[in-house]
Image (cartoon, grey):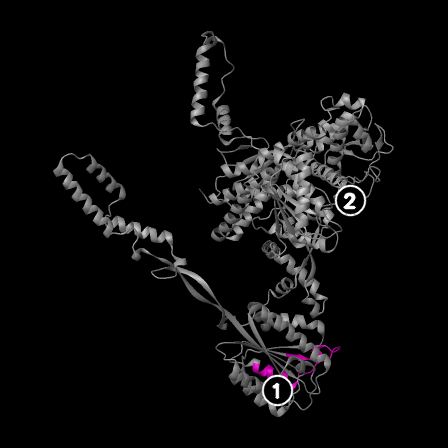
Amino acid sequence: MSGLLFDGADWNFLTLQRIHDACETVAHKELGLDTYPNQIEVITAEQMLDAYSSVGMPLFYKHWSFGKHFAYHEASYRKGLMGLAYEIVINSSPCISYLMEENTATMQTLVIAHAAFGHNHFFKNNYLFKQWTDADGILDYLDFARGYIGQCEDRYGRLAVEHTLDAAHALMSHGVDRYPGKKKLDFREEEKRAGKRRLYEEGTFNDLWRTVPTGPVKTSAVLNVERRRTLLGLPQENLLYFLEKTAPRLAPWQRELLRIVRHIAQYFYPQGQTKVMNEGTATYVHYRIMNRLHQEGRLTDGNFLEFLQSHTNVVFQPEFDDPRFSGFNPYALGFAIMQDIERIVKDPTEEDREWFPDIAGTGDEMAVLRDVWANYRDESFITQFLSPALIRHLRLFHLHDDPADRTGILVDAIHDERGYRRIRRELSKQYDVGYIDPNIEVVDVDLAGDRRLMLRHTVVKGAQLSETDTKRVLQHLADLWSYDVSLVEVDAATDKVLKEYVLNPRIQPAAA
Amino acid sequence: MHIIDRRLNPGGKSLENRQRFLRRAKALVQGAVKKTSQDRDIKDVLEGGEVSIPLDGMDEPRFRREGGTRDMVLPGNKKFIEGDILPRSGDGSGRKSGPGQGDSEDAFRFVLSKEEFVNLFLDDLELPDLAKRKFAEAESEGLVRAGYSTSGSPANISISRTVARAMARRVALRRPRPEAIAELEARIEQETDDDKRAALVAELEALKAKAKRIPFIDPIDIRYRRFEAVPKPIAQAVMFCLMDVSGSMSEHMKDLAKRFYMLLYVFLTRRYRHVEIVFIRHTDRAEEVDEQTFFYGPASGGTLVSSALQCMHDIVRSRFRPSDWNIYAAQASDGDNATSDSENVARLLTDNILPVSQFFAYLEVGESGTYSFEMPDSALWSLYERLRANGEPLSMRKVRDRSEIFPVFHDLFQRRGTSQERAAS
């Protein structure tokens, strides 16, 4: 099948269908992608703004902060400060892509290849998304959440719901499980395990062990503390989960609201960790598809040039001293590494063979990339696949800025033999959630005394929490907990207490 | 693959969230609206537009870190080698932070629509005597669920209710269950003794007959969902604009009056779904005219205010029953009136007009450039002043300049409590 998909800039729904089918052929046959079924929705600029304000989801519960974001986006869009995205894609099954009606036919092709196949494949196959998100259920869940929150507003008042949601939103970034939990065994399994252990003990019984001296006996106080901490599941870094399960005075509906916010935070958790990869994948896929379509004579040279122009804009990486520089462009970085992988697989140099013995010269770049897309996140992806060649190409360097050092900022590594590994390590750290999010945990609850909730922030490299924001967040936390809340900032290296916050709930609990 | 065209979906999906945001930021936004509107023309005042509010109180706090030792990897090295120390001052190391997010800016600018602007603008104003508000002229009827009924259209059958009632009836009347009949039949099959068998058969017949008599679902079980039509009441108001158009009224004065009427109209339409306007202009005789003639039509003659009041009274009597309409009147004049007319005016007002009106505002307009306190009280002003002293519900203000219109309007319609304090002071 061949012939031009379209000519010029105009498109209609038949064109979209043709474009989709052509992209699908390339994506599935040539690139071997495995995608959710696609649903393509054409929307207007206003609807795009709507989608922006509800974090891209087609339906969401009502809250003033979304209105605020909407007002903000709308104002900057009208002033021309901000262009709108060409597309938004939702990790759901079917995978929903929003296309702007203003896009030209070329742009629609680009966007379909990018979102409906690139992102779609990534969503379906990456381990983080598989582990943490339920693409089939998310829209139903959001529908439930919206309905439930609406009901709560009717029943308990808009203000009460708003307060709870405000508090939950403030803690949202600390409302995710970072590790998949242990599956609870059902009784039969547990019985089986207990039986096995008993058999093992009987099989290995030796009376001698009885005579071996044990360590000092734990005092009852220590045992009490340990018991309490196990019961409460401490230490706990998922603050919302902890409050939902243990906050003493929350109404059941408030717990459900915390749960909703927590689930949504968890749903978006993989996206924050895979920005570079996600965008890199989509960019790589659209680049391959568009090139193939052009080679097959299905795009005119003019349309292809139009595509190249926007593609170049997308993967533009300004240098650090460029006024346009604002950090790494995830599209550019992801795309560059993936193209580099393709080069290593197909046409490796001696250096590549030394650095990447597993993949250098294997010849099948799609197999390697599909494996990469499935099993890595930004941090591990960069640690594994940022090659010396690319470091040289981007001329990366590492700065170490210690405020205590009066003389200035140290250039710690540059793109040379001594620097490659250090640069790679540091860059991957910039994408490691373990470093990005402050490490805050619930460490204990004073159950015998005033029920104070005790939190601890482990300060890494001297970066403490900003005071005003922290007080506000803790205020919300105290309101939910309804007793005092304290937060200590402890230096990770020296165990020295740097700062302590104590906040009381705004509404004093009635005498219980 | 599906392609869905969402473009025709109803817009304003974010409207609700936006309203929540505005409600939450109300005090701040209102302050901003006041500030922006001070230096605007009335026409522009109603245009909406951009306002800027401080972000305090609208922030969404998160745990954020700041300070500490920082490590960063940057692209585009040109001349640095390992071990170089870059001076901290100056921008030699490049800009390290990206452009601040919108949320971290100190002030937050956004655009208000016309309606939002007007609503916020007029929000702390209150119509006087809202109590009299009359619900009439039902424009629409809404359907409301109202229990169940024994008759209705098949589409409205309440299945759950019907089945529940049928079951209750079957249980109450002890209708034999199909299982019981089946069991009995089985026993008849197995029974060898003829006598017993005959007895069982008889029993079976009885059960079957009973099951037949008591149907599974009887017409008396059927219930329909009932709906009642409820008229949605709509408040209505009529606004009388009275204006002196005699030779002494200059274009400037008419312009002031027009602005006042405009504001009043906007204000009323916000409170009442249905607002009618009646324009009455007068010289020494009054007539009801359309808007164009009212403001721009030429007229000349003496001045008899009572003619306009009489005209208004006649129109009220013929077209706007006071029990059905909220009546508002605003009169604009330069204050001239024939001395002999005062008695008539006072009588018409106290006996006929004020008792049926919610509100009667008198606006005395003057040439710009003079200050209100420099103006000697005019004939009409003194007369109204006297009426007011007798406790008649009259509001009156003097206006010279465009910029005074809004404050005056604001004064007149301020929430009751404060306006009385103001009047007392």
Rendered position, A355 above or below B397: above
Q: Nearer the viewer, mark 1 or mark 2?
A: 2
Q: Residue furthest front?
A: A1
Say which residue label 2 marks: A304
- What x and y, as percent, mark residue B288? 61, 84
Say which element carries label 1: strand
Q: Amino acid under label 1?
A: Glu
Q: Which residue is at 59% across, 44% downward? A: A169
Q: Are marks 1 and 2 on the same chain?
A: no
Q: Chain under label 1?
A: B
- What x and y, as percent, mark residue B119? 61, 64
Report the side of A40 relative to A509 (left or right): right
Q: Amino acid under label 2?
A: Phe
Rendered position, A253 above or below A403: below
Rendered position, A216 above or below A143: above
- Residue A177 is at least partly visible in this image: no
Is B371 part of what is drawn in magenta?
yes
